[in-house]
Image (cartoon, rainbow, N blue to C red):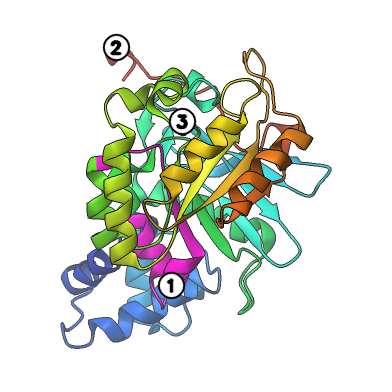
Amino acid sequence: MKKKNFFDFNFENLKDFLIQELNIDNKKVSMRTNPIWQHIYQKGVFDIKNLTTFPLGLREKLDSLVTLQIPKIKKKQISIDGTIKWLIKFFDDNEVECVYIPEKNRATLCISSQVGCTLNCKFCHTGTQRLVKNLNFSEIINQVMIAKKELNDWGEQKKISNIVLMGMGEPFYNYDNVKIAVEILKNRVGLNYGPKKITVSTAGIANKIPDAAKEIGTYLALSLHAPNDNIREMIMPINKKFKLKDLIAQCKFYSSVVKEKITLEYVMLRGINDNLECAKQLIRLMAQFPCKVNLIEFNPWPGVQYLPTEREDIEKFGKVIQDAGYIATIRRSRGNDILGACGQLKTESLKKKVSQL
């Protein structure tokens, strides 16, 4: 019988498996499940034989049924600023990139939710890669486990302090798997990231935002990038389906449920969305719900038609917003020398034809 992969279980599935396959009493299953979960996710145990808190007989039985296999790193790149990008090859040969961004007081891991993307945002490198597949929840979590293993991040003081789902793909178009992955990230006997240490980003799938408020409950980042529908439709085709009016209403709801500000992501494109009139329009938009804005230096990639806004002009734009009483942070580009910065991720994975499956 083919072994099951541990990372294909969520917490409740693992409980059911231990009851059915190891005949563990229903009343004692949590006592058995918790240390397994803790040893693997918190202590980095990747061999069932080393689950020493689990009785030997049960350990041998579990080892015959379950593997702790994680995907391989195909390529690793280290930026001059310390950013690390990993190209991860999954068991089905599809690939994604994830990025580790160390800073003075924290370190963020940016992970992907899809191979490719359907949204075709004009300034985003991932948007030039057609959607290949949704990642399942284990493939999302595997990115975290690979990074933790690479960094030897198994101590009480986490080297990876924050997780952001801002890599390849649109998380809300893979909602169910993202939801389970976030549950695993938040599990206190597992990876144990609080909801304020996790950010899920969306390009604005308005009809999923209410569900996310009630079921995911992390920080939310909205990839806004324009203060009005005309500009946004030009650079983000998804705006034709979900207008700013709808997004504003749903962001207001999300903030009211989670009790946190929404982070607006705003990439600065020279001559497109960076003039002072755009800044004034953005202020009027920000007045409608609790939010703050990250002004992002555009990171060019091969073949892109846009240019980055000059730093001086970004600062002027930000000052207009700050003078109106809102938080505007200029986000410094990290990892752009290895195409690891915001909007630069892409792999060579292609969707297989039916004849190739």
Image coordinates of residue 153 in percent, x first then y, are 64, 67
Q: Between residues 322 and 64, which one lies in front from this camera angle?
A: 322
Q: 10 Å neighbourhood of mark 1: few (<14), some, or many (≥20)?
A: many
Q: Which callout, 2 or 3, points to the residue nearer the camera?
A: 3
Q: Amino acid at mark 1?
A: Gly
Q: Which residue in the structure is indicated by mark 2?
A: 355
- 133 in relation to 333, above or below: above
Image coordinates of residue 291 in percent, x first then y, are 46, 55
Q: 10 Å neighbourhood of mark 3: few (<14), some, or many (≥20)?
A: some
Residue at x 22%, y 53% (from the top left corner): 211
- 330 in relation to 50, above or below: above
With 82 as the anchor, is 32 left or right in this view?
left
Q: 10 Å neighbourhood of mark 2: few (<14), some, or many (≥20)?
A: few
Question: Which of the labelled discs sits on residue 94, or is there none?
Answer: 3
Q: Amino acid at mark 3?
A: Asn
Of the residues under marks 3 and 1, which one precedes in the sequence? 3
Residue at x 49%, y 45% (from the top left corner): 283
Whole-angstrom CA distance, mark 2 to mark 3, is 17 Å
* Magenta-colored span: 180-206
Of the residues under marks 2 and 1, which one precedes in the sequence? 1
Q: Which callout, 2 or 1, points to the residue nearer the camera?
A: 1
Question: Which of the labelled discs sits on residue 11, or is there none?
Answer: none
Answer whether labels 3 and 1 touch (C-beta < 8 Å).
no
